[in-house]
Image (spheres, rainbow, N blue to C red):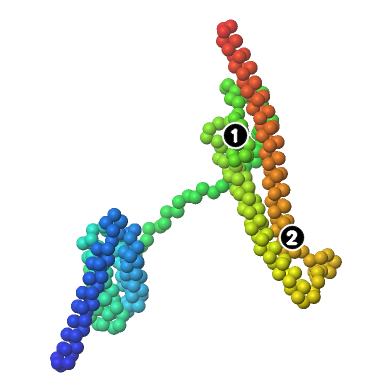
Amino acid sequence: MPMHVTARDSNFAVLAQSAEGHRNIEIDGLLRLMPRFLVPGHHGPHRKAAIALYRALITQSYAVALQREERDALQSIIRNRFKAHRVLTSERLLRNAFCAGYKALDHLDAAVHGDERSIANLHELLPKVPQKFRDTTHRPLVQTKRYEVPLLPLHTGPSVLDRPLTREEIKGPRRPATLISANSIPFLRFKKPQPRNLSNLLHQRLKQRASRIFRLEEGYEMLLVATQEDQWDQIVEKEFNLGNMPGPDNKYPRLTWRHVWYRQIWMMRRLHEEEKVKNALMAAKMHDVVIKEQKLADDEAMEMSARSKVS
């Protein structure tokens, strides 16, 4: 073997050992800086280092000259080993895992650049890996059932305001309803827990009210911007002697920026006031229903008590 080849190989070996030494120092420093009260997976620098190593290994596995089956097996090995090491908390085991990962990355880098020895090592080591780490089959994802708000069913029974019901329509003792206010939305509660369709209805109405309040606040906020836009338009019209330019149909004067937001504010306040009046009327009607049912319940209780005394 020529002397210059031996010297070059020795220089490469020294550089490789030096790089490996620096890498070990970085790994030790990373592990020492990790707080003891944190799980490694929750430590930012540790997560970044692990994700960077994983991405580098997967990227190089695509670039290395291997058959498709061997490449799939190699990528499965990488994924399975990282998945198995996610739960590690021991500093010694984490250091060994990082060192093994960086050594594998060095071999892949060398194989990508055409190093025959590294390629031969890959062909030799891949068949020796246990099948459970080379398995490329994936379990089907179990999709959790997500609750979706169903359409409200067609109500065919008596209305809430049609109460109180007659004694023949009731099974068992009469239980008067309770008037409840859900953020100023009145409703009658007949039993606990309340039906899901009632909860859905209340949720939709509260969501609609929140949307109106948001649009009302948006109108007040944008009104200041619209005022400034109108002032700018007046400056431009005065500067260029444009006057009050007509609208697109040349019949009505042009609308101002403020007009749009004034209209939105007026509409949202009107809908809010209409809802308040509607809720007040509904609450009064429901209160009458509760009073009537309570009176009937008291009368029926007294009647049953009198019958029991007679018998």
Residue 180 image offset from top left, x and y in percent: 59, 34
Residue 161 versus residue 5 in the image, above or below: above
- For the C terminus, give its image quadrant: top right
- The front one of 177 and 195 is 177
Residue 130 image offset from top left, x and y in percent: 25, 64
- The front one of 229 and 165 is 229
- The front one of 69 and 114 is 114
- Tags 2 and 1 touching, CB below 8 Å: no
The kind of residue on which mark 1 rests is: Ile
Please tell me which residue is depicted at 57% across the width and 41% down the height of the picture: 199
Question: Disc 1 on helix, strand or loop?
Answer: strand
Q: Residues within 10 Å of mark 2 (few under 14, many from 20)?
A: few
> CA gap, disc 2 to disc 1?
40 Å
Q: Nearer the viewer, mark 2 or mark 1?
A: 2
Identify the residue under disc 1: 180
Q: Quadrant of residue 114?
A: bottom left
Residue 112 left/right relative to 217: left
Question: Disc 2 on helix, strand or loop?
Answer: helix
Residue 77 image offset from top left, x and y in percent: 30, 66
The kind of residue on which mark 2 rests is: His
Q: Which mark is residue 17?
A: none
Residue 175 left/right relative to 6: right
Give the farthest residue toward the right: 251
- For the N terminus, give its image quadrant: bottom left
Q: Which mark is residue 259?
A: 2
Q: Quadrant of residue 184?
A: top right
Please tell me which residue is depicted at 59% across the width and 39% down the height of the picture: 182
